[in-house]
Image: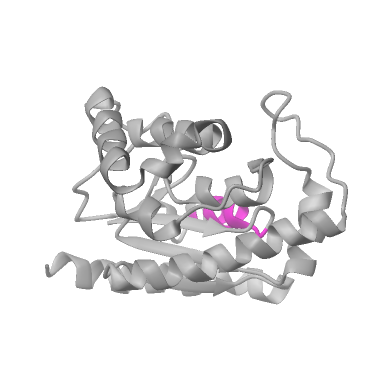
Amino acid sequence: MLVEFISLPGAGKTSIIQDICNNPDYKDRINLIGKKKCNRTSVITEIIIFFIKLVFIYPKILLNIKSSLWLLKKISIRLCHRKNDIKDEVCLLNESGILMPIISFITQRDTNSYQINLNKIISVLPIPDVVVFIDCDIEIVIDRYADRGGPQTKGPGIRDEVIVSTKLYERFASGQNALLALKQILKRKKCIVITIRNNSLLDYEMIPFSLFNKLESKLQLYKRF
């Protein structure tokens, strides 16, 4: 059962994944799938299928390639690392989920204010079995984001300085709206959606236990089909 986490940047997604996978009560019952663990078979095939679907379903994004290049490139790379047909274990996608780049693009990388048609972009992507949304108020997540730093444009481990401004709030508001829309789209596609609140330390401390139990119960249901 493939599980992808998605949130605004700075909402705590990576920390939550690491805490669950490092917790002695859960780590032997969860498989973390990062770039190094993913199979790289059928690389060309996955990318070709993706772009063929775009040609027929969402050609506008290709015609605006100058604006959408980062997003299409990131999705293509992550398609290369994707594993499929995992039914008997909980597999958390880390650095290889294909939905998170959409939110990263809207909040961090969209320099030309390009409007993504979420219904169309989702329709050409393979959807995880479960998507965990990490929910956090914009004011709180921007404070965390500013402390952590922005995108790593200067190399691994070197994050850009974040300038808190009206424009940053507008981008994160757009990202939050996209998350809400994605929830509805995924539910219509029969994807299992789990929402986790991470506004405070108390929220954070409760997440590993509650989330693992939810994933375990979903896995049992998933195995039946």
> In the shown orientation, is residue 1 left or right of residue 204?
left
In-front residue for pair 222/78? 78
Can residue 127 be seen here? The reply is no
Residue 184: percent from left, percent from top = 41, 73
Residue 145, x across and y down, in percent: 76, 52
Dominant SS type (magenta): helix
Q: Which region shows up in magenta?
A: 11-20
- Residue 58 seen in this snapshot: yes
The residue at the point 26 percent across, 66 percent down is 219
Residue depicted at x 51% and y 57%: 6
Above-or-below relation of 155 to 84: above
Give yes or no for residue 18 being in the magenta stretch: yes
State which quarter of the image contains the C terminus: bottom left
User: At 51% from the left edge and 49% from the top edge, which residue is drawn?
Assistant: 102
| Side (left or right) of 98 relative to 64 | left
Left-right relation of 214 to 143: left
